[in-house]
Image: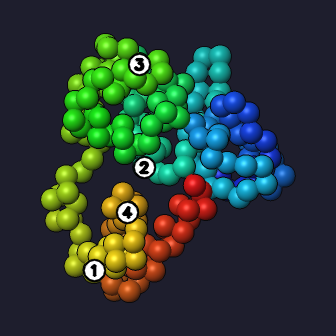
């Protein structure tokens, strides 16, 4: 599968973009068409959906957003178009917060989500979308924690730092300064992608 594609925006439609990657135009359904402009360089995280009579590629600003999308489409009765529409109306953090807080009203305000679907999303996903802060802290080495503290000191949001920490944790045995460099690189790539 294709994890992400980096290239220039060649065209923007109502719900899709065409991303030019080395002369090949990728048609990607994208929930944030209002945030991109023709000619800009972007890193788009991708998911290819294959159905009986359709093959579609869906794109996302971040790995967090893609992970949430994959969780949403695992809910019975919730398809990729509805999940993408939800992400076009609310940030991943807002949707996660609504699910964790059992906020049926917020979820019902999303396009294509009724009372039954909202309740099913909460039933299936509550407690599975976020690792508890305590568990996340416990799994970090002191070097990763130091790098995260440094990123916080530089003004990065906790949601951004969590994404960087995930990548840092996948590379054990580094020094705090090496982890800081890794974190800054991840955050810079996410800025290019967003």
In this rendering, does residue 172 appear at all? no
Q: Where is residue 101 in the image (x, y as percent from the top left)?
A: 21, 35
Secondary structure at numbered mark 3? loop
For image coordinates 57% across by 36% down, the residue present is 31
**Along the viewing direction, whichever of 151 and 57 lies nearer the viewer:** 151
Q: What whole-number distance in Å separates the C-alpha atoms at marks 1 and 2?
A: 22 Å
The image quadrant of residue 114 is: top left
Give the class, few, some or many, for how many residues have Cα within 10 Å of label 4's Cα (few <14, many ≥20): few
Q: Which of marks 1 and 3 is nearer the N terminus?
A: 3
Residue 104 - label: none
- Label pair 4/1, CB-CB below 8 angstroms: no
Residue identifier under label 3:
113
Residue 64 - label: 2
- Label pair 3/4, CB-CB below 8 angstroms: no
For image coordinates 26% across by 75% down, the residue present is 145
Frontmost of labels 3 and 2 is 3
Frontmost of labels 4 and 2 is 4
Q: Which of marks 4 and 2 is nearer the N terminus?
A: 2
């Amino acid at each position: 599968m294709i994890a992400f594609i980096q290239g220039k925006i060649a065209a923007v439609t109502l719900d899709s973009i065409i991303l030019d990657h080395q002369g090949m135009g990728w048609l990607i359904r994208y929930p944030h068409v209002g945030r991109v402009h023709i000619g800009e360089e972007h890193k788009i995280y991708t998911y290819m959906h294959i159905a009986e009579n359709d093959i579609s590629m869906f794109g996302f600003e971040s790995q967090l957003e893609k992970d949430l999308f994959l969780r949403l489409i695992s809910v019975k009765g919730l398809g990729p178009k509805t999940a993408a529409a939800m992400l076009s109306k609310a940030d991943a953090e807002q949707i996660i917060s609504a699910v964790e807080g059992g906020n049926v009203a917020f979820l019902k305000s999303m396009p294509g989500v009724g009372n039954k679907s909202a309740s099913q999303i909460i039933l299936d996903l509550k407690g599975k979308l976020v690792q508890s802060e305590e568990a996340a802290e416990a799994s970090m080495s002191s070097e990763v924690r130091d790098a995260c503290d440094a990123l916080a000191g530089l003004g990065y949001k906790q949601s951004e730092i969590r994404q960087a920490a995930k990548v840092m944790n996948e590379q054990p045995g580094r020094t705090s300064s090496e982890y800081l460099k890794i974190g800054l690189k991840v955050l810079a790539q996410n800025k290019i992608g967003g």
